Image (tube, rainbow, N blue to C red):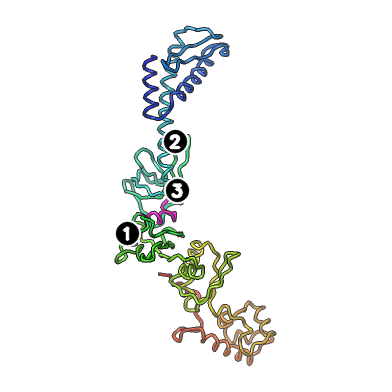
Amino acid sequence: MNQELLTSIEYVEKEKGVSKEVLLDALKQALLSACRKTYPDPDRFTIDIDAKTCEIHLLENGKPFNDLKFGRIAAQTAKQVIIQKIREAERESIFDQFYKRVGDIITGNVHRVEPKAIIVDLGKVEAILPSREQSPQDEFRQGHLIRSYVMEVRKSSKGPEIILSRAHAGLVQRLFELEVPEIHDGIVVIKGAAREAGSRTKIAVLSKDEKIDCVGSCVGIRGQRVKNIVRELGGEKIDIVRYSEDMNAYVRNAMAPAELKEVRLNPLDRKAEIIVNDDQLSLAIGKRGQNVRLASKLLGWQLDVRSVTQKIPLMEIAGLDAKSAAILNAVGVFSLKDLVRGTVEDLAKLEGIGEVLAVEIMGAAKIMMAKYLPKDQPIIKKEEESTHESA
């Protein structure tokens, strides 16, 4: 048994990276535990294992104690300890291997699709792609090849637990690194990304070489590079934003395709007030607020988008005094845009306004409103029509 045990321990030490001292100590503790279950008054027994020969001796009060039963126990315990340590070493090796890949893209095969997760076969281990980390555009079935972002690797009683994601913004960043040589080589740097999986991503890039166009590099000839990434993401739209140290310029780039009239920065609170012409408001906000929401995530700033007419106070309208303004404020009318949404009839019904003043105020309001709108755009635009999505 000694030679067989010695060979096994040397194999585990060499192939699995578990030191001989750790194995012998684990074996010693396991044998002591077995003795406590086998012999009465176990405190009088100790275990001695020769580190060179792996000979195992049971001592009773410091003297050798020979028992055939212990020989069988020792053989069985040694086998169990070796197997356990091999399993532990393999789990530790797999954990280390995949822990190093956190934040990277990994490829596997869909093993099975469950209601709350997709189980992905990575060869040595299975990984979990939870439903919350799946993109709405994804439709994977058993056997499909799948590329995912390694979001987390943690230890568990059953071995390493690998959590994947197809919704993380890091997936888009890594795809750009794989697709764009200039990013891989460090000439073009990704400064940040904001994503709503399955719908749209904004990614900010910067070139370290003035001769290299960072946006053009990411788009590729005829848009081929970005098209490959869009295809991988199931048609998700991608806005490539030019990063700038100038926050004013960076805000304008992040809010594209909307054209901004004015940007008022508050660096202390990391807030920005954005003023746009009325015809750009829906474009700046985006469908269901997506454009401004993603821009805010990308910048790390709170953005407040208003149209020009939303910022014009009532007191700037000819013929409207403080008393009339107070009456309008009381019914929720605070700006020029709020006012022109109503009619002369609505205005005339308010106590203290009357029909004559209502006609005068509304006429002046529409004249002022027309100054800020293109000739072909109606003065009053229904909110439900303002759903133009940024390209």
Residue sitting at x 32%, y 59%: 228
- Magenta part of the protein: which range? 165-177
Q: Residues within 10 Å of mark 3 (few under 14, many from 20)?
A: many
Secondary element at image label 1: helix
Q: Which mark is residue 190?
A: none
Quadrant where the image shows the N terminus: top left
Q: Earlier in the sequence, mark 1 or mark 3?
A: 3
> What amino acid is labelled 3 in the image?
Met
Residue matched to label 3: 151
How many angstroms separate mark 1 from mark 3 (CA)?
23 Å
Q: Nearer the viewer, residue 261 or 69?
A: 261
Residue sitting at x 47%, y 69%: 255
Q: Which mark is residue 159?
A: 2
Q: Residues within 10 Å of mark 1 (few under 14, many from 20)?
A: some
Residue matched to label 1: 228
The secondary structure making up most of the magenta span is helix
Confirm or deny contact between disc 1 and disc 3 (CB under 8 A).
Answer: no
Give how far across and how far down residue 157 sits, in percent: 48, 34
Give how far across and how far down residue 270 sits, in percent: 57, 64
Q: Earlier in the sequence, mark 2 or mark 3?
A: 3
* Residue 200 visible in rendering: no
